[in-house]
Image (cartoon, coloured by chain):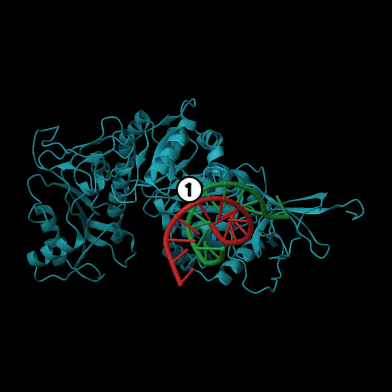
Chain colours: A cyan, B red, C green
Amino acid sequence: MGALDGRVVIADVVFDLPLDHPFSYRIPDSLIVTPGQRVSAPLGGRGTRVGVAVAIRDGDAAGLHAIERVVEPAPILSAGALELGRWIADESLSSWGSTLLALLPPPPRSKRAEVLAPPIEPARGAAAPPPEVWMDVQREDRLAAALGDTPGGALVIAPDTDSAARWARRLDAARLDSGAGPAERRAAWFAAARGRVSIVVGTRGALLVPLPPPAVLVLLDEQDPSHKPPGPPRLHSRDILLRRAALDGSRLIMLAGAPSAEVWQKSVAGTVTRVADGPAPWPEVIASDTRGILRNHPLTLPLTRAIENMSRAGKSVALVVSRSAGAIGCNDCGAVLRCPACGVALQLRRDRRGMACRLCAKTDAVPERCPGCGGHRLQPFGWDAERVEASVRRRFPRLTVSRSDPSAQVQVGTAALLRTPRPRPWGAVGFVWFDGFLRVPDFRAGERAFQLLWSAAEAVGTGGRLIVQTLHPDHYAVAAVRGQDRDAFYRQELPFRSELGYPPFRRLCHVSARGKTAAGAKTLIDEAAGALAGIEGLTMYPPMALGAPGAAAAARMRVVVKGPDDLPRLVSQALRPFLERGRRSHGVVEIEMDPVNS
DNA sequence: AGCACGCCGACT
DNA sequence: GTCGGCGTGCTC
């Protein structure tokens, strides 16, 4: 690296920018920089930013600025982790830098360098055992016991910080999530890298923690949509862990009472191993038909009885309400108005003057009569927590009824009630208006409803009751939970997904255009849709406006694209000109791969 | 993403 | 005559 010929050592650095190309810097003689190391370097105008060195090479220093300092004296990411980050960026059509930096603990505030050893390189190429999904009621206890016996390290990914905190306490593990302080997070990261702690618990931000092999990777509540929140890394934690386990030969354990359709399909295909038990303690599941009732009172007879019996037995009852969903149902036959082409529930527009399909954007007036039974009681309605609370108070004046007090005899709330841990199980759980979940205008509504019922059944103790008030008492989600039979649910659900070309059989992608004006957004989305049109294997729905109709908010347009496994590559090739900051006059094109809601 | 440069409207 | 709008292009 003699300076005579101008050849010096150069670091290629990626930053948290929407630009998917590295910036090159000269490495001053006073610094040693290796791939995977965080560095601080000048970028644009004035000021420095923290980035990650992804490559070190010899080159011509002409016109290059110098790295200013290293954030840590050793790499924070292994070569394998860098490569995994590259894969996540490719799969989600985001930049390497924004992906990597979202997966690292915050840089230290002070410039004082921490003394640490380099992370241990994962054993690449080792054959990984097939990933497992543990579904039995005892799965959490078994996990805690199994991790206690594990010789190597373990990385446990929780869906949210509350869960991470609980599990860190339970496993006596180092905590690495945004609920922990920055210093604690960094300490946990490097302690794990050095093999000094055996178990690390975190949320998504911990997915790249280096662990000495053999390590066990764990995904808690696999079915929880919180595993793919908005923002980088823009990929589901399940997919990241499946990839990581395969790359570094780790065992992967996913926990879910009722797994996602994606994991279930993998288990059917034999790439994921199901671990279940025989019949577990299970409540009596009662589907209570609300036809003709539920207009003036939120409780059917079975739920009223359950409240009476349980309060007499000193047990508490949860009443679960749904957030009003905007789908349109018939109060006579229980049918939901659906788009004939897409199969998803049509949604009442906010101005209430029509209804629209979220996927194909077809809009229509709300019909006078139900297309199924001819009934004229078509309406979106629901019992919210406030109304339910007041009504139950009136009906049971001697019971404590509350929306906030966990010790109340009857507690009313949304589905989040079931996720709050409690010392004793519920005596009964009642779904006031289960159709509110079935009617959510999303192709995953049935799956979500099934998983919700399953978790409710698990949260009810033996001898308890699960009461489902619905116009669809024979719905296959209810039947499957009553029979404690996951397979029965997916035997119905998977063919539906397959026939309509939904995940897990095809991949989905949202392409949206945001402009200053509705016309600008429309122009841009039409151009983007034009670039995607005619690509072999893609199915594209017509553009539709997002947000409130009318107003100024219509400056967002979206198309839904379905395609094969290599959808990211197909879309990125076709839309490259839109993603490389060219068309700013009309707005910005954004791509969401594998959307999990709406 | 931020930021600087650059070319057209209403204001002290 | 300026101040300032944001459209366009760049950052090693």
The image quarter containing residue A336 is top left
Extreme residue in the right direction: A4
Residue sitting at x 60%, y 63%: A189
Work out whether residue A489 or residue A585 is closer to the camera in this orientation and state it.
A585
Residue located at (27% from left, 51% from top): A282
Q: Chain of mark 1?
A: A
Q: Position of residue A284 (x, y in %)?
A: 21, 51
Question: How many circles with numbers are drawn on the protein?
Answer: 1
Work out whether residue A249 can be spotted. Answer: no
Where is the C terminus of chain A found, in terms of image quarters?
top left
| Residue beneath disc 1 | A236
User: What is the quadrant of residue A415 in the picture?
Assistant: bottom left
Q: Residue at x 10, y 44 (%)?
A: A291
Residue type at mark 1? His
Relative to the observer, which residue lies in front, A290 or A310? Answer: A290
Could you tell me residue A467's position as x and y percent?
18, 52
- Crowding near pointer 1: few (<14 within 10 Å), some, many (20+)? many
Percent position of residue A437, x then y: 25, 48
Give the side of residue A479 with respect to residue A230, left or right: left
Q: Nearer the viewer, residue A324 or A223?
A: A324
Q: Position of residue A447 (x, y in %)?
A: 32, 43
Say whether residue A164 is left or right of residue A491.
Answer: right
User: On the rendered structure, is A381 left or right of A424?
Assistant: left
Does dot 1 land on a helix, a strand or a loop?
loop
Residue plotted at (33% across, 63% down): A420
Q: Is residue A571 left or right of residue A6?
A: left
Residue A4 appears in the rendering: yes
